[in-house]
Image (cartoon, grey):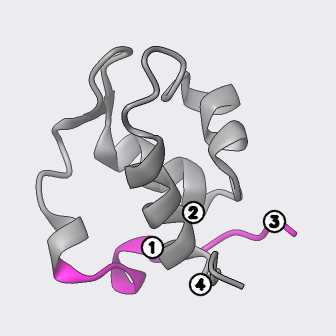
């Protein structure tokens, strides 16, 4: 289920609002804000974020961080 989030930063805890201009995906130089905007525009899985930004397409070390952003922005409980 995809939907657009108007102000994704309102949904994030303060710790996830830090370093928005830094690369979250170092391998492909995708900054955190670009990933947040992609999620807010409807990407609701790590795979959807990868298809739109190429984040996680290298070593994949950013998958956990991206999953956490998806969980917060789309208010998904991944521990169901």
Q: What is the spatial separation of the Cα atoms under label 2 and label 4, in whole angstroms?
A: 11 Å
**Does residue 25 belong to the magenta stretch?**
no
Q: Residue at (59%, 84%) from the top-left corner?
A: 75
Secondary structure state at the residue bearing disc 1:
helix
* Location of residue 16 (image quadrant): bottom left
Q: Mark 2 vs mark 3: which is more N-terminal?
A: 3
Q: Which residue is mark 3?
A: 2
Q: Which residue is mark 1?
A: 8
Q: Position of residue 17 (x, y in %)?
A: 21, 68
Q: Mark 1 vs mark 3: which is more N-terminal?
A: 3
| Residue 5 against residue 47 in the figure, above or below | below
Q: Residues within 10 Å of mark 1 (few under 14, many from 20)?
A: some
The secondary structure making up most of the magenta span is loop
Q: Which residue is mark 2?
A: 40
**Residue 60 left/right relative to 49:** left
Q: What is the spatial separation of the Cα atoms under label 4 and label 3, in whole angstroms?
A: 12 Å
**Residue 43 left/right relative to 57:** right
**Residue 50 left/right relative to 13:** right
Q: What is the spatial separation of the Cα atoms under label 2 and label 3, in whole angstroms?
A: 9 Å
Q: Which residue is mark 4?
A: 75
Mark 2 vs mark 4: in front: 4
Q: Magenta stretch: give its range.
A: 1-14
Q: Are discs 1 and 2 less than 8 Å apart at CB?
A: yes
């Amino acid at each position: 289920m995809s939907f657009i989030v108007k102000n994704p930063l309102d949904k994030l805890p303060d710790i996830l609002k830090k370093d928005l201009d830094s690369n979250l995906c170092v391998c492909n130089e995708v900054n955190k804000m670009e990933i947040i905007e992609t999620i807010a525009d409807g990407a609701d899985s790590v795979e959807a974020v990868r298809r739109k930004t190429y984040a996680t397409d290298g070593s994949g070390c950013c998958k956990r961080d991206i999953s956490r952003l998806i969980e917060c922005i789309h208010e998904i409980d991944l521990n169901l």
